[in-house]
Amino acid sequence: MIFYLNGIFVGLLVLANIVAVKLFSIGDTFILPVAVIVYIFTYPIIDVIVEVYGKKEGQRTVKAGLATQILALIFIAITVHLPAAPVFKDQASFETIFNGSFRVILASLISYTVSQNLDVFVFNKLKNRHGDKKLWLRNNASTMLSQLIDTTIFITIAFYGTMPIAILGTLIMTQYMFKFFAAIMTTPIVYLLVNLARRMDSDTNICKNTVTR
């Protein structure tokens, strides 16, 4: 199951970077990048990995996610700068979608590295304190704190100096409010994946023991 979780985690990270250029609105209050919809699901997955497989496995997954994002950005940059064939008429649109600014990319990588490692650390600390009990508490506490740090770091690095401080604060709070409620709504997913991972690993161990005998 760990391989599936790692694959989904990394896939969501790359997808979030690809779709980040589009903005969507919720009423007249929230204007958010669509990447938020994808990225919020990475936290439940990393929490499941720490819950079932431990802190070290969670840290390995975060490192793998960082390496994959860097590789994806390198290859995207290469494809953007390759000369377009005469029959390809959408080079400008291609560049608009895939060629993000260096500052935004740097903000994304730094905020990811800090917040995801913080999530692993806080979740593991709470698990050591409560054991298998209160999964909902460590999932929500670690995710809500990490999402606040992620949002603050990203928006500050990406947009500081380009707009008034008050607007930056508004962006941070509106995005965090969305992520806060999303963390609560994804709690059942954590329970589902934890139970599924333990069941699949248990079945795998039974099969291995049967073959060994």
Image (cartoon, rainbow, N blue to C red):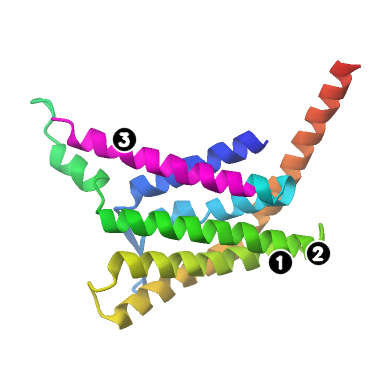
What is the three-letter code of the residue carrying label 3? Phe
Quarter of the picture holding the N terminus: top right
What is the three-letter code of the residue carrying label 1? Leu
Task: Return the x and y of residue 101 as percentages of the image width and height.
Answer: 24, 54
Q: Nearer the viewer, residue 97 or 160?
A: 160
Is-magenta flag for residue 88?
Answer: no
Helix, strand or loop at label 2? It is helix
Distance CA(mark 2)–CA(mark 1): 10 Å
- Residue 166 image-quadrant placement: bottom left
Residue at 78% of width from left, 28% of height from top?
Answer: 204
Q: Would residue 186 be seen by someone viewing this image from the given angle? A: no
Q: Nearer the viewer, residue 171 or 109?
A: 109
Q: Which mark is residue 137?
A: 1
The tag earlier along the polypeptide, 2 or 1, is 2
Q: Which mark is residue 46?
A: none
Residue range of the region highlighted in magenta in the rendering: 58-83
Which residue does the numbered mark 2 point to in the structure image?
Answer: 130
Helix, strand or loop at label 3? It is helix
Contact flag, marks 2 and 1 (Cβ < 8 Å):
yes
Q: Is residue 86 above or below residue 134?
A: above
Task: Return the x and y of residue 97 as percentages of the image width and height.
Answer: 25, 46
Q: Would residue 91 be seen by someone viewing this image from the given angle? A: yes
- Residue 106 image-quadrant placement: bottom left
Which residue does the numbered mark 3 point to in the structure image?
Answer: 75
